Image (cartoon, grey):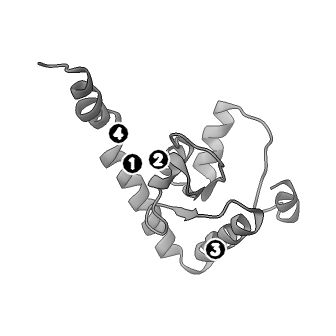
């Protein structure tokens, strides 16, 4: 990623640190959020991106499998640099050549997060029944 950022300084940034305020700003400004996890039990990074319009590009593993390729983001299978690079090139191509398709993916992802995973629904349909509340 560092080499790619050096090759595309006007288009890509790589920050080897974490700051929550900076993270929120980066997500909000990004077209894509790349999540090349080898192991991912839940997958909150993609959620964060989707809520502010950054389309996730994920390695389809664990909790990231909820990203549907071409519908709510982009996913790739093999965990190797060549496959990740090809997936990034695919995203760039769609960004350049099919902005309407990318916007539809962005809207679909955003809608799904709020329809299926918003706190009021998770609380009402997940936690309350789990703990037998309201009986």
- Answer yes or no: do the residues labelled 3 and 4 have beta carbons within 8 Å? no
| Residue corresponding to mark 4 | 118
Q: CA distance from mark 1 to mark 2?
A: 7 Å
Query: Quarter of the image containing the C terminus?
Result: top left
| N-terminal label among 4 and 1 | 1
Q: Position of residue 1 (x, y in %)?
A: 80, 56
| Residue corresponding to mark 2 | 51
Neighbours of disc 4 within 10 Å: few (<14), some (14-19), many (20+)? few
| N-terminal label among 3 and 1 | 3
Determine the secondary structure under disc 2.
Answer: helix
| Residue corresponding to mark 1 | 113
Instruction: Kindly identify the residue that appears in the image at 34 percent across and 33 percent down.
Output: 119
- Answer yes or no: do the residues labelled 1 and 2 have beta carbons within 8 Å? yes
- Answer yes or no: do the residues labelled 3 and 2 have beta carbons within 8 Å? no
Instruction: From the viewer's perspective, tell me whether residue 99 is left or right of residue 1.
Output: left
Instruction: From the viewer's perspective, tell me whether residue 67 is left or right of residue 111.
Output: right
Neighbours of disc 1 within 10 Å: few (<14), some (14-19), many (20+)? some
Q: Position of residue 132 (x, y in %)?
A: 20, 21
Q: Give whichever of 30, 67 is nearer the camera.
A: 67
Q: CA distance from mark 3 to mark 1?
A: 24 Å
- Answer yes or no: do the residues labelled 3 and 1 have beta carbons within 8 Å? no
Q: CA distance from mark 4 to mark 2?
A: 10 Å
| N-terminal label among 3 and 4 | 3
Q: Give whichever of 115, 100 is nearer the camera.
A: 115
| Residue corresponding to mark 3 | 90
| N-terminal label among 4 and 2 | 2
Dividing the picture into quarters, in which one does residue 16 lie? top right
Instruction: From the viewer's perspective, tell me whether residue 93 is left or right of residue 121.
Output: right
Instruction: From the viewer's perspective, tell me whether residue 121 is left or right of residue 99.
Output: left
């Amino acid at each position: 990623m560092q080499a790619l950022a050096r090759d595309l300084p006007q288009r890509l940034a790589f920050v080897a640190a974490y700051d929550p305020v900076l993270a929120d700003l980066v997500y909000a400004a990004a077209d894509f959020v790349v999540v090349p996890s080898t192991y991912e039990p839940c997958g909150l990074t993609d959620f964060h991106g989707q809520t502010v319009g950054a389309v996730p590009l994920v390695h389809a593993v664990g909790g990231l499998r909820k990203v549907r390729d071409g519908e709510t983001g982009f996913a790739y299978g093999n965990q190797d640099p060549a496959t990740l690079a090809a997936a990034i090139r695919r995203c760039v191509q769609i960004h350049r050549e099919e902005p309407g398709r990318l916007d539809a993916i962005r809207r679909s992802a955003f809608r799904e997060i709020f329809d299926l995973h918003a706190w009021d629904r998770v609380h009402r349909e997940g936690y309350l029944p789990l703990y037998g509340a309201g009986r």
